[in-house]
Image (cartoon, helix red, strand yellow):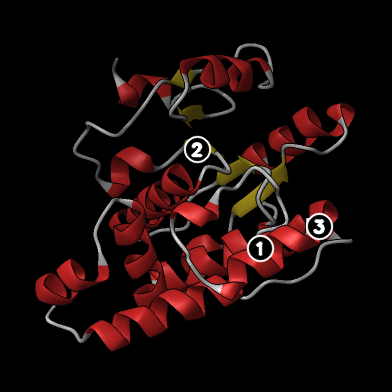
Amino acid sequence: MNILQEKNSPQGSVCIFSQCQMTSLGLQGLLPRGTKVIPSLQHINMRPSELEGIHFLYFLPHEPHFLFDGIKQISELLTQSGIPLKIVIFSRVQSSWILNTLKNQVRKGYLIKYVHIVLSHSPCGLISPLIHSFLFNNLPLTSNNINSTSEKIYSGLTREEFETMRNILNGYSIPVLAKLKKKSSGTLHAQKLSAARKMPFALPDMKWSRVFNTVNYKKHTSMS
């Protein structure tokens, strides 16, 4: 597919990222008729000039492994581009946690200027208009408040907390990480516990017991 041709669409092209093909098709159905869709940019050597005019619709599942890997991909996309991109994230996870975590990963806060969250449990009649509005209008980040006025505000994970948790979710033990990262096990354990305190675990199907053997898991599951 010729990306330079696709982005000449009057509304711009949309790249959909999802680990599930059926979800990708469902998200495509929420876009305005005639929108040019690019299935994926993961295997293309992207340059800022190629990204101009391309918008991104990203599904972040609530499963921990894919959630962390998805945030990692988005942060790398923004860092690599060096310019604010219009990105709509479709997810069940609390928007303030995603945005604050993402902001901490990209270092340069202006890169998330046009990043918005559309909560997947929003009323059906709102989802498509919100996606359309955020993708094709120059709405600043504060416009995202329309989705989360009743949400508790969560602080995001630092870069160190995020990377430690992502590695744990990918199967690395703390002793192994300590050797690979040349850090003490105590430091990594402290980062893991700090991350646990910052995470929104209200969703009962987030099986964090696989990762944490701490009172934090018991506390959050008792609240759900």
State if disc 1 and disc 2 touch (CB < 8 Å): no
Q: Which circle's residue, 2 or 1, is located before the other in the chain?
A: 2
Residue that numbered label 2 is attached to: 56
Residue that numbered label 1 is attached to: 200
Q: Position of residue 52 (x, y in %)?
A: 40, 42
Q: Determine which of the numbered discs, if any, sits on residue 117 in the image.
A: none
Residue sitting at 67 percent across and 12 percent down? 33
Q: Which residue is nearer to you in this view: 190 or 44?
A: 190
Residue sitting at 33 percent across and 60 percent down? 168
Q: Residue type at mark 3?
A: Ser
Gap between marks 2 and 1 measured at Cα: 25 Å
Relative horizontal placement of residue 132, taking residue 27 as reference (left or right): right
Relative horizontal placement of residue 53, taking residue 224 as reference (left or right): left
Residue that numbered label 3 is attached to: 148
Q: SS for tag 3?
A: helix
Q: Which residue is nearer to you in this view: 173 or 142?
A: 173
Q: Position of residue 67 (x, y in %)?
A: 48, 47
38 lies above or below 151: above
Q: Residue type at mark 2?
A: Phe
Gap between marks 3 and 1 measured at Cα: 14 Å
Could you tell me if residue 140 is visible in this image?
A: no
- Quadrant of the rendered structure where residue 87 is? top right
Q: Position of residue 199 (x, y in %)?
A: 60, 67
| Number of other residues with Cα within 10 Å of mark 2, as a class: few under 14, some 14 to 19, many 20 or more | many
162 lies above or below 224: below
Q: SS for tag 2?
A: strand
